[in-house]
Image (cartoon, grey):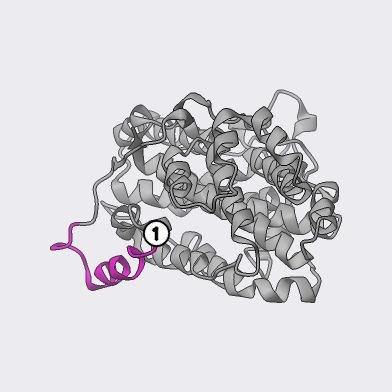
Amino acid sequence: MEQRRFSGKGHWYHETQSSTGQAQALPLVPEAATVTDRFLLDLVLPEDVIAPCQRWLDPARALYDRLFPRSVSVSRLRTFSAYDRLSTALTVAQVYGVQRLCNHYAARLAPLPGPDSSRESNHRLAQITQYARQLASSPEVIDARAREQLDEVGLTTWDIVLMDQIIGFIGFQARVIATLQALISQPVRWLPGMEMQQDAAAEPFRNHDSRWTPQLESVERHLASAAQLASLAQWQPLPTLRVLTPILAHEHHLLNALGAVLQSDMCDTLDASLVDLVALLTARINGSLDCFNTLATSAVPDAPIAALRSGEQALNTWSQGDPQARAVIQAVQLLTRAADRFSAAHFTPLVEQGLSPQQAVNLLAWSGLCGWLNRLKIALGDTH
């Protein structure tokens, strides 16, 4: 949204999250808009750690370019402008408080002309910002009414799919950057983000049977383009995307890039029980009942499904006998709830418990990718 002008245009903090105190605003960093690597934002990293990550970093970079091109054309079906995209990205970056992200998206947003000053435009932008903040910080609150409010301000299915992908992507990017800054012992934040995300309520997770139903229209095959049909055929067999693909195929370029990240097998050197534990844990925190129950039916026997259903105390009791799982749980909990507070003190125990730095990076990046999928499931459908 329009940046708060304390003195000229020299600050990046959003009006919707600024306070009355000038100390809350930080100087704009124009050079943050011109980084070479727009996903890792020119972090200087050990080559031996980052080289094995290239297979999922490359499609993540390609997805950034799809989401935030240098110019955007709007139409009747696709009304989300370049300003809308970058404003949404900055809102989400501020939720997570990862300074490098805030600097980058603020610097890219600053030169762009905002919407006109009509009441309708203001209401539309306010609704987009509210939705983005809610899906980023408290995803379980997104419901049918939240989707109706987007429709009321004129957003199309294409707009909503794009916005949900932006919100999920920024969450993933924030957690990757927080992880890598922890790896090299750099602080993640200068100012705090929002309050720590609270875990979703336990009650829905006591339901072992659930059914996810889409709440946005799917691509109609008889009207789909050849590229959309190819995307459907390629990604619908992938278990993690099976039910989402018919909706995500509206923006098939984004679906293709997301599928490439998922297909990179970032966790192929890790024990399957740890990978499942991370996916279950993020779904539990974020309130994605369908992600949780889908995995719970096929997870390895050692996965602490019952403890996760019961709550954090039961999970802590379960993990006392497994120091490695405990270290993973503590790291993923903090990274999922408050990425800006993640540090070397939370990364190091993973290495001390037997993971290589490369494996720890990949496992934590996986937690960010799971959070992205959790939010897509919550935003695009309902679980009963």
Considering the image in quadrants, where does the C terminus appear? Answer: top left
Q: Residue at x 37, y 60 (%)?
A: 73
The answer to whether residue 119 is visible is: yes
| 347 or 131: nearer the viewer | 347
Q: Residue at x 46, y 35 (%)?
A: 131
Task: Specify whether residue 172 is in view.
Answer: no
How many labels, in total?
A: 1
Q: Which residues are magenta?
A: 220-238
Is residue 92 left or right of 319 when viewed as pictured? left
The residue wearing badge 1 is 239
Q: Is residue 228 magenta?
A: yes
Q: Residues within 10 Å of mark 1 (few under 14, many from 20)?
A: few
Task: Tell me residue 155's x, y (percent).
Answer: 33, 42
Q: Is residue 305 above or below residue 144?
A: below
Viewer-proximal residue among 284 and 198? 284
Q: Position of residue 282 (x, y in %)?
A: 58, 43
- Name the residue at 53% across, 42% down: 283
The correct choice, above or below, for 53 with respect to 255 in the image is below
Q: Is residue 7 left or right of residue 143?
A: right
Secondary structure at numbered mark 1 = helix
Q: Residue furthest left?
A: 222
Please state, as top left, top right, bottom left or bottom right, where the N terminus lies in the image.
top right
24 displayed left or right of 210: right
